[in-house]
Each structure stands twice: as structure tokens, then as C-alpha cells.
Image: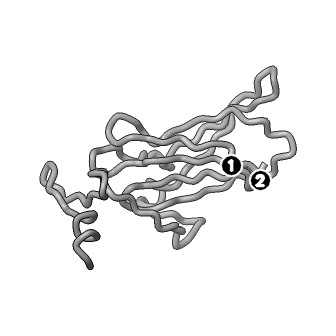
Amino acid sequence: MNRREAIKLTTVVALGTAVSLDAHNSPKKNRIVMTPKDAKNLTKGELKHTPQITLGQKDSKGYTLVEITVGQGGIIHPSTHTHWIDFITLSANGNKVGTSTLEAEISRGTASFSVKLDGVKTLTAESGCNLHGIWTSNLAL
């Protein structure tokens, strides 16, 4: 590792927890795409990180409220200085609808989008945990 890389990966101790920082003094983020070992029998850790897609009412203009919460089975992902959901993305039939960027501690792993679902067969939610990677779930319509 050269000097420049070492500076980018400087580790500091904050509140008793070691946190790796990037060149902008922001906590580094794990961008590894994660998959559950058994999609039909998720572990507690997998439940905590897997986005749940919920459909709401359709409005008079034809938009349906799509809510995404990171965590399932009563297990909600934490939002602390060292462990949080930093983004949630929604796609419809593989086309990106939008992304919500979240900040540590002051925001929770939830997002909502108003979407025209005419002709949509699949919704895909993707969430990024700064420590445990990117998690995906799909909802067939």
C-alpha cells in the first residue's frame, strides 16, 4: 500500500469504535452485493438488512405509494454513527425510479416513492448498509 492509499484508509477511534474513513473524512461504505444463504429462511441479520416493499393507495393521477423499509419480521435496521442505511433505490421492471440518500443517526432506513405501476411486473428495492453491503428484494405485481 502506498502512502496516498494509507492516508485514505486512516482509522480513527470514535466513541470507542474503530471507523475507517475515506479521503473526505466520511466513514467508508461496504459496496459488496449480498445474497441470503436461504431466501425462504432468512437469518436475523439478513432480515435486518433486507428491504421490505409495501404498496399503498393509488391516487387520482394514477400514482401508487411505494414504501420501502429496511428490515423485516419486526427487526428494523439501526441508524447510528457507525452503522446505518446510506441509500435506498427503487426500480420498476429494471428501470430506476429513484434513490433516497440517508445520513447516519438523523435518518432511518425508510423511503417512499409515488410510482405509476401500469405495465410494471416487478419492483426491486436495493439498500446499502455502510458495514454489511448492498441488499435487494423484489416484489412481483
Q: Which-is-in-front pick, marks 2 and 1?
A: 1
Q: What residue is drawn where x is 17% and y is 56%?
A: 17
Report crowding for label 1: few under 14, some 14 to 19, many 20 or more residues within 10 A (C-alpha).
Answer: few
Residue 49: x percent and y percent? 46, 55
Farthest residue to the bottom: give it.
1
User: Horizontal placement of 1 versus 70: left or right?
Assistant: left
Classify mark 1: helix, strand or loop. Answer: strand
Q: Label for residue 96?
A: 1
Q: What residue is drawn where x is 16% and y is 51%?
A: 14
Residue hosting label 2: 93
Q: What residue is drawn where x is 55% and y is 71%?
A: 38
Q: What color scheme is it? A: one colour
Q: What residue is drawn where x is 76% and y is 28%?
A: 58
User: Horizontal placement of 8 versus 115: left or right?
Assistant: left
Farthest residue to the top: give it.
60
* Amino acid type at mark 2: Asn
Residue 7 picture quarter? bottom left
**Which is more toward the observer, 46 or 113?**
113
Residue 57: x percent and y percent? 72, 28
* Amino acid type at mark 1: Lys
